[in-house]
Image (cartoon, rainbow, N blue to C red):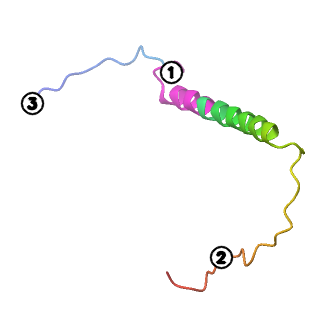
């Protein structure tokens, strides 16, 4: 059985253009981070417009047993 031989000696050792998976990973990470910060700023202004007193007053209601019950089996 004959196998095809490809000469790859002229190819660069490292590629840093849009064909590289690292490039796409960095691009999508940039999109995710940009979306996260846009949501953060949008949420701030949404909450700011819906409260007459800013920052909102703290609630005095005590939370009852906020620790998880790790001793009980599910």
- Number of the front mark, 1 or 2: 2
Residue 52 appears at what percent x and percent y? 87, 42
- Which residue in the structure is indicated by mark 1? 15
The CA distance from mark 1 to mark 2 is: 49 Å
User: Which is nearer the N-term, disc 2 or disc 3?
Assistant: 3
- Which residue in the structure is indicated by mark 2? 68
Instruction: Please give the range of residues in magenta.
Output: 13-30
The CA distance from mark 2 to mark 3 is: 64 Å
Residue 17 appears at what percent x and percent y? 52, 18
Q: Is residue 34 left or right of residue 7?
A: right
Residue for point 62% across, 29% down: 30
Q: Nearer the viewer, residue 59 or 42?
A: 59
* Position above or below: 65 against 6: below
Residue for point 51% across, 23% down: 14
- Which residue in the structure is indicated by mark 3? 1
Q: Secondary structure at mark 1?
A: loop
Residue 44 belongs to magenta span: no
């Amino acid at each position: 059985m004959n196998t095809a031989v490809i000469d790859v000696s002229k190819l660069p050792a490292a590629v840093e253009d849009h064909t590289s998976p690292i490039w796409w990973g960095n691009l999508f990470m940039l999109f995710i981070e940009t979306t996260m910060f846009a949501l953060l700023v949008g949420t701030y202004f949404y909450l700011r417009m819906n409260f007459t007193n800013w920052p909102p007053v703290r609630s005095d209601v005590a939370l009852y047993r906020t620790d998880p019950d790790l001793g009980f089996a599910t």
